[in-house]
Image: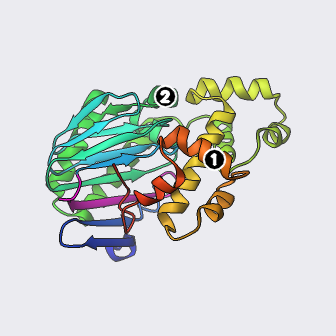
């Protein structure tokens, strides 16, 4: 694939104290049905070292290529990643923390939960609220960090990721399509009653199925997805009023919004907005 055509977006911030650059790219066309995009980032910050990684349903696949990166996951467990180390994380019902120790750089594979599970070779429920180090997943996973370090550039790294993802997809079976359908519907805000009517299941059967697959009941997954939509809207449009963002995310009223933001982010909606970093820089601790 033409490297120029791969680029989706480039975001740069530099105020003389903090700086970061993020480049998003398309995966190869054979990978695109399974991976939304790749991201490469490079940053160095002086006014802060720690970000809040908000609760959510999307999961992460990160390979660190810079200074040591410290992660405190939603369970409170500390993970230290050196250059070439990486991890996969699933659904998180609480805030995680990421701490930089110098100039940071790395790659992020953005993929639906079911495909992150395939890439890791770990069940979705086992990824909930924690992270799994690539070193613990075998030689094939350990080598991806070394190959990306050797690649030397973001452009060369896209091809390395294509090869790795393609190999993993060929060596693993697709996840249950009904589970993928259910999670997709819940993530988009479909109500449980509407969903059970659509698929012809009882509420009890749906609850058992989702609990077994991801470790959450459907309503809990839907609530987490709603908070995630609100957080994404605020980061994409930080000047939007809280009321408009809440409505777009699917909250019934201000009290509903305040309750769930407090539950998942341990702060008020206004505090969350005030902690947003510019140019999609995340959330300051």
Span shown in magenta: 32-48
Residue 38, x across and y down, in percent: 38, 58
Q: Would residue 97 appear left or right of 57 to someone viewing this image? A: left
SS label for mark 2: loop
Residue 56, position in %: x, y?
Answer: 51, 43
The residue positioned 50% from the left and 51% from the top of the image is 34
Does the rendering let one see residue 114? Answer: no
229 with respect to 87 (left or right) = right
- Is residue 38 in view from this perspective? yes
Q: Nearer the viewer, mark 2 or mark 1?
A: 1
Q: Is residue 124 above or below residue 61?
A: above
> How far apart are the two marked residues, 2 and 1, measured between alpha carbons?
19 Å
Q: 180 or 188, which is in the foreground?
A: 188
Residue 187: mark in rendering: 1
Q: Secondary structure at mark 1?
A: helix
**Residue sitting at x 24%, y 45%:** 99
Q: Does the stretch in magenta take in 234?
A: no
Magenta residue check for 45: yes
Q: Mark 2: few, some, or many residues within 10 Å (few <14, many ≥20)?
A: some
Contact? badges 2 and 1 (CB < 8 Å)? no
Q: Nearer the viewer, residue 49 or 41?
A: 49
Of residue 84 and residue 98, the one placed in the foreground of this image is: 98
Residue 22 sits in quarter: bottom left
Q: How was the colour assigned to the protein in this rendering? A: rainbow
What crowding class fits label 1: few (fewer than 14 Cα within 10 Å), some (14-19), or many (20 or more)?
Answer: many
Q: Is residue 231 left or right of residue 42?
A: right
At x 46%, y 53%, the residue is 271
**Marks 2 and 1, the one that precedes in the sequence:** 2
Q: Which residue occupies the extreme bottom position in the image?
A: 4
The percent position of residue 113, horizontal first and vertical second, equals 51, 42
* Quadrant of the image occupied by residue 23: bottom left
**Residue for badge 2:** 123
């Amino acid at each position: 694939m033409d490297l120029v055509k791969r680029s989706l977006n480039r975001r740069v911030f530099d105020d003389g104290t903090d700086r970061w650059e993020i480049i998003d790219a398309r995966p190869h066309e054979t990978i695109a049905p399974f991976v939304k995009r790749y991201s490469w980032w490079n940053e160095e910050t002086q006014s802060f070292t720690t970000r809040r990684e908000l609760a959510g349903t999307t999961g992460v696949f990160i390979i660190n290529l810079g200074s040591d990166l410290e992660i405190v996951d939603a369970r409170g467990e500390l993970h230290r990643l050196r250059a070439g180390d990486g991890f996969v994380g699933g659904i998180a019902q609480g805030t995680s923390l990421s701490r930089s120790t110098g100039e940071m750089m790395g790659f992020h594979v953005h993929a639906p939960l079911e495909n992150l599970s395939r890439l890791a070779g770990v069940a979705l429920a086992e990824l909930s609220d924690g992270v799994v180090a690539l070193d613990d997943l075998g030689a094939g996973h350990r080598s991806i960090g070394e190959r990306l370090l050797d690649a030397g550039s973001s452009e060369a790294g896209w091809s390395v990721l294509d090869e790795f993802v393609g190999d993993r997809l060929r060596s693993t079976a697709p996840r249950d399509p009904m589970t993928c359908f259910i999670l997709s519907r819940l993530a988009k805000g479909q109500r449980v009653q509407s969903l059970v009517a659509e698929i012809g299941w009882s509420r009890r059967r749906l609850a058992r199925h989702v609990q077994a697959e991801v470790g959450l009941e459907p309503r809990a997954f839907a609530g987490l997805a709603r908070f995630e939509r609100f957080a994404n809207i605020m980061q994409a449009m930080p000047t939007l009023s809280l009321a408009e963002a809440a409505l777009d995310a699917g909250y019934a009223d201000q009290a509903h919004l305040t309750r769930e933001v407090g539950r998942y982010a341990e702060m008020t909606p206004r505090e969350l907005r005030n902690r947003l970093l510019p140019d999609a820089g995340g959330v300051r601790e």
